[in-house]
């Protein structure tokens, strides 16, 4: 081969091209990492209520490495998504020297017992809220079904002027509702949405006539329901 001038020429040309490519890559890397291309700011956009400037500053200092061209966008996204109220993030470059962080925050729907929050997608997240929210309680993974039925239950109860404060699902998938007037409704395990609709339909000519004195309703009957009336407390007036 060493006596083959054509082969030697090809090898020499290939080596030259490789050397040029390495030099160009080194030059591009050097240019991309010079100070003039440093990230100068981060713009957080979206319906943001819980992401603070201090949190953004902390991520910028501790997590964002490199320049405008070399910063790890996936790493930046992962860092922002660790924040308690952040559901999803999209990080983009904005020429010449800024990053745009598009944030979707969790929208709280309910509390999950005493341990977490439930968003409108039925997902659990860590957070704190001063809002008056219903409480969901159930086995692990049941929050999605609870969210779905909670909406259906509230649509029915709105017809009689009531709304839900608590939804409980047992390990055996038995449902119980706590209403805003203190009434507890046992729904059982099967056909719970239909059972509540039937109760609402019959409400005006049954429980509604009791003047809000009901504190417990058991709908686990095939052809009706049982009602317990709240005990009246009397105080003796003395002269």
Image: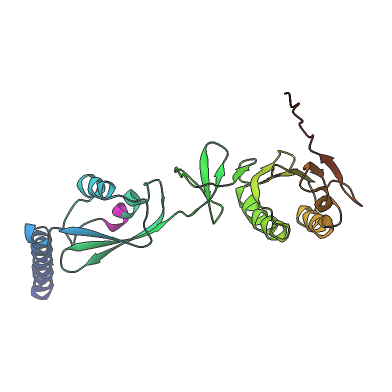
152 displayed left or right of 83:
right
222 displayed left or right of 69:
right
Asked whether residue 14 is in view, the answer is: yes
Is residue 33 found inside the magenta-colored segment of the image? no
146 relative to 40, above or below:
above
Residue 161 location, quadrant = bottom right
The image quadrant where one finds the N terminus is bottom left
- Residue 236 screen position, x and y as percent: 76, 26
Q: How many marks?
A: 0
- Residue 9 screen position, x and y as percent: 8, 73
Q: Who's the residue at 69% across and 53% down the image?
A: 162
130 displayed left or right of 47:
right
- Residue 237 screen position, x and y as percent: 74, 27
Task: Between residue 85 and residue 27, name the one nearer to us.
Answer: 85
Residue 169 location, quadrant = top right
Q: Who's the residue at 36% across and 63% down the image?
A: 46
Residue farthest along the right direction in this orientation: 223
Task: Between residue 168 and residue 204, name the one nearer to us.
Answer: 204
Is residue 75 found inside the magenta-colored segment of the image? yes
Asked whether residue 2 is in view, the answer is: no
The image quadrant where one finds the C terminus is top right
13 relative to 183, above or below:
below
């Amino acid at each position: 081969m060493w006596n083959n001038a054509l082969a030697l020429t090809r090898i020499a040309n290939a080596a030259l091209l490789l050397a040029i490519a390495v030099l160009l890559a080194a030059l591009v890397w050097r240019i991309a990492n010079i100070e003039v291309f440093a990230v100068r700011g981060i713009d957080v956009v979206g319906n943001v209520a819980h992401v603070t400037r201090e949190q953004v500053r902390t991520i910028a200092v501790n997590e964002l490495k490199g320049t405008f061209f070399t910063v790890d966008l996936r790493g930046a996204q992962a860092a922002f998504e660790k924040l308690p109220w952040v559901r999803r993030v999209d990080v983009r470059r904005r020429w010449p020297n800024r990053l745009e962080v598009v944030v979707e925050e969790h929208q709280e729907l309910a509390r999950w017992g005493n341990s977490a929050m439930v968003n409108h997608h039925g997902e659990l997240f860590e957070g704190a809220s001063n809002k008056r929210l219903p409480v969901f309680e159930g086995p692990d993974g049941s929050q999605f079904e609870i969210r779905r039925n909670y909406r259906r239950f509230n649509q029915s109860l709105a017809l009689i002027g009531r709304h839900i404060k608590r939804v409980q699902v047992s390990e055996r998938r038995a449902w119980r509702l706590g209403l805003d007037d203190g009434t507890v409704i046992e729904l059982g395990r099967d056909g719970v949405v239909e059972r509540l609709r039937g109760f609402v339909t019959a409400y005006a000519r049954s429980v509604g006539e009791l003047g809000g004195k009901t504190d417990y309703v058991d709908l686990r009957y095939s052809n009706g329901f049982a009602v317990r009336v709240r005990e009246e407390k009397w105080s003796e007036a003395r002269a």
